[in-house]
Image: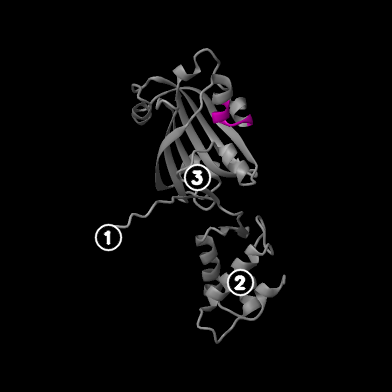
Amino acid sequence: MTDMWNKPLQESSPLPLWFQIAERLRQAIAAGIFTAGDVLPSESQLNETFGISRATSRSALDSLEQEGLIVRKSGKGSIVLGPRVEQPAIEMYGFSDDMRRRGLRPSYHTVFAGRGRASRETGDALGIGVNSPVYHSRRILKADDQPIGVALSWIPLSIFEGTTLPTAEDLSRNSLYRWLNDTCGVKLTGARETIEAALAEGDMAAELEVPAAAAVLVVRRRSENADGTPIEYAVLHFRADRYRLHLETGVVVRR
């Protein structure tokens, strides 16, 4: 079974050669012959194995990269990625709970945690004035030690009355939502989100370990408690090759 991916191609098949090779490699990844972190055969190795042109092997690998199965890095080759994390857009989960229920180990690296000032966007979301004091954090979200997202969060300081603000160490050890629940008695029960596509730039690209201008998903979320009071405004950037959102809607039939 382990060598089935490199058996001779079907020259008489109506399917293009690059498509056949991509499908062989796709099935080999699905079967666990190549697992996350493995390097696929190079273009030159594929050329030699199948007797094809460099353009054909490049097209096959390009196809797998576009599907999010591999990432191609200069000097390293085509590296197999782990399965994408899929998040239902209508569900409200903290990152750590969401990852654990998918069998992944969540962890965080807190870049910043402390006092800040509300921008106009943040103030509008939280119902406070521009430049109002807020608690601000910036964290890199990881699944099985691999960066999957960057979370920027703003919370009104009034939420922390009677307690100290969470430190960077607090947020690197545990979920922000769990900290709010355990320390402040604040439970988030709902959120309003907008989702859009963007390109990673500067520090964001470096923190996500993707090339500049790589595609990312941007989620802007206003979370609230049971009585509708806004508790947090967050902007989350997720790697498009490791994370996707899906939405299920009802179908209305008009006769």
Q: Earlier in the sequence, mark 3 or mark 2?
A: 2
Q: Give the Cα separation between the discs numbered 3 and 1.
A: 41 Å
Residue found at x 43% / y 43%? 218
Q: Nearer the viewer, residue 163 or 51?
A: 163
Residue 72: x and y in percent read: 57, 59
Q: How many marks?
A: 3
Residue to which mark 3 is pinned? 238
| Mark 1: few/some/many CA within 10 Å (<14, 14-19, 20+) | few
Tag 2 residue: 24
Q: Earlier in the sequence, mark 3 or mark 1?
A: 3
Q: Which residues are magenta?
A: 173-179
Could you tell which of marks 2 and 1 lies nearer the N-terminus?
2
* Mark in the foreground, 2 or 1: 1
Q: Amino acid at mark 2?
A: Arg
Q: Nearer the viewer, residue 175 or 59?
A: 175
Instruction: Please give left or right for residue 70 compared with residue 213 in the image.
Output: right
| Residue at left offset 50%, top offset 36% | 151
Q: x, y (%) of residue 234?
A: 45, 33
**The disc labelled 3 sits on which kind of residue?**
Phe
Q: Are marks 3 and 1 in contact (CB under 8 Å)?
A: no
Q: Is residue 43 above or below residue 167?
A: below
Taking the view exactly as shown, the residue that stands out farthest to the front is 255
The answer to whether residue 196 is magenta is: no
Q: Residue at x 49, y 30 (%)?
A: 188
Q: Main secondary structure of the magenta part?
A: helix
Residue 182 at x, y percent in the picture: 59, 23
Vertical side of 121 occupied by 86: above or below: below
- Which element carries disc 1, helix, strand or loop? loop
Numbered tag placed on residue 255 in the rendering: 1
